[in-house]
Amino acid sequence: MASVLSLKKTIYLGPFVHSQSLAELEICTQGAIGVDEKGTIAFVERDVTEAIAVAKHEGWESAELVRVQDNGFFFPGFIDTHIHASQYPNTGIFGKSTLLDWLNTYTFPLESSLHALSRARQVYSRVVSRTLSHGTTTAAYYATVHVASTNLLADICLAKGQRAFVGRVCMNTLSPDYYRDASVEDAVRDSRASIDYIRKIDPGAELVAPIITPRFAPSCTAECLSALGELHRETGVHCQTHISENKPEIALVKELFPERKSYADVYDAAGLLTPKMILAHAVHLTGDEVELIKERGAKISHCPASNTALTSGCARVRELIESGIAVGLGTDVSGGFSPSVLEMARQAIWVSRFVAMNDGDQAKLSTEEVLYLATRGGAKVVGLENKIGGFEVGMDWDAQMIGLGAVSESGEAASESEDPVDVWGWESWDDRVAKWVYNGDDRSTVAVWVKGRLVHQTSRYQR
């Protein structure tokens, strides 16, 4: 299995960039990062030559050397805190729909078709490969209601080496008769079956872990949510769901759960609003809900592209961050039109500027801040902040090599690389990073590692 592959000591040489805090990027223009046989960072050296870096560390004389190529740098792997693997074929298809119409028109028919394992294998193999190619080293996936195909998604993540939380979707009401849990008992039994299977294939959760996944409050009865809350308490695994995505949805929750004070209170009453809960969207939270989520320690996945595509609204991310809630980024494929977390970083900047047009410049998110949300923020959301998201001793080497294009004196590309980012040579390192954030895509991602294992490479990568 991917989690037990034997690796060789490796020293990664060249510039590296990572978040030190929400507002500060560290840009080291000449670094050396040693990664041991377990895929763990053993040392980080700054401003040293290659020879000195090797000589300083006894036992690393025969380590493999990997050097940054194509005018680039090493950057932590992206963390997608909310993505529907089962919806990947619909990416970019949302028509003129709003959320509830979109579910019935596009989503439920596609998801239900993945009961066929051949179809599920095709979809899940592609989405894992595609997200890896965009530098996503960790993903919190929604699968479908089907146990076998949900388990298959976990198998594929493990085989391809992507770190993942894989959730079997639960819904026993307000969904088509052909695609729902027949009873609360079925929802709990089948969720437990997937939890047990995923724990069996990766007992230490080195790469793949289960996650309890009630779709959202309107698709689950109060009894079902409470039963899943009990399963959460019993198993201790993470949970994920949606909250306050758009106003008609919120009105529906109020109608379905009149005894509850708010959307967040629905989950709290069921025992689901805990530090291991990931709440996607959170566009229209009330002040009381923000306080409740903070008090319970639940986390939020900001999905800017999806919220714009489905005209759900603009989440006030600055307010969420300042309240003390951990926030990460989610692609929300296929409500979101791209599987790229880098694209979500751009979209998060735009959404914050839309908010700023009404609320003032303090609402704007900076380049540094969205890169934090894409890495360390996401790590906090999935409970792995001590393991991934940055380049520090003791953390896993979940990383990507970024390559940037260079412009020759003739004005042509200096190589045959099709990188979308043009570097002219006069840019500061801050400029280079900003150009990547605003112009980069998967063509800029030369290679990707998860826990020290090379899981994606392009023709530009040379060892």
Image (tube, grey):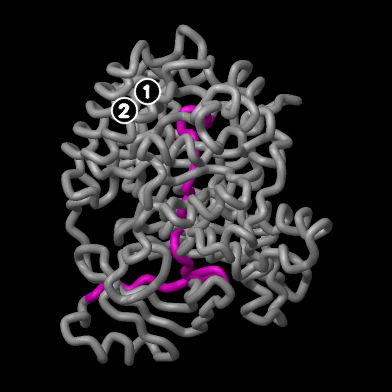
Segment tinted magenta in the rendering:
63-88
Q: How crowded is mark 1: few (under 14 residues within 10 Å), some or many (20 or more)?
A: few
Residue at point 63%, 60% (across, down): 319
Q: What residue type is labelled 1?
A: Glu
Is 260 in the magenta?
Answer: no
| Image position of 263 with respect to 443: above or below | above
Q: What residue type is labelled 2?
A: Ala
Residue at point 37%, 48% (across, down): 274
Farthest-out residue, right: 357
Lateral position of residue 207 relative to residue 221, left or right: left
Q: Nearer the viewer, residue 102 or 415?
A: 102
Res 425 quadrant in image: bottom right
Is residue 419 among what the camera can see?
Answer: no
Residue 260 at x, y = what percent? 51, 33
Q: Which of 45 and 292 is in front in this view?
A: 292
Q: Quadrant where the C terminus lies? A: bottom left
In contact (CB < 8 Å): disc 2 and disc 1: yes
Res 412 quadrant in image: bottom right
Residue 462 at x, y = what percent? 42, 63
* Residue at which label 1 appears: 223
Residue 335 at x, y = what percent? 61, 34
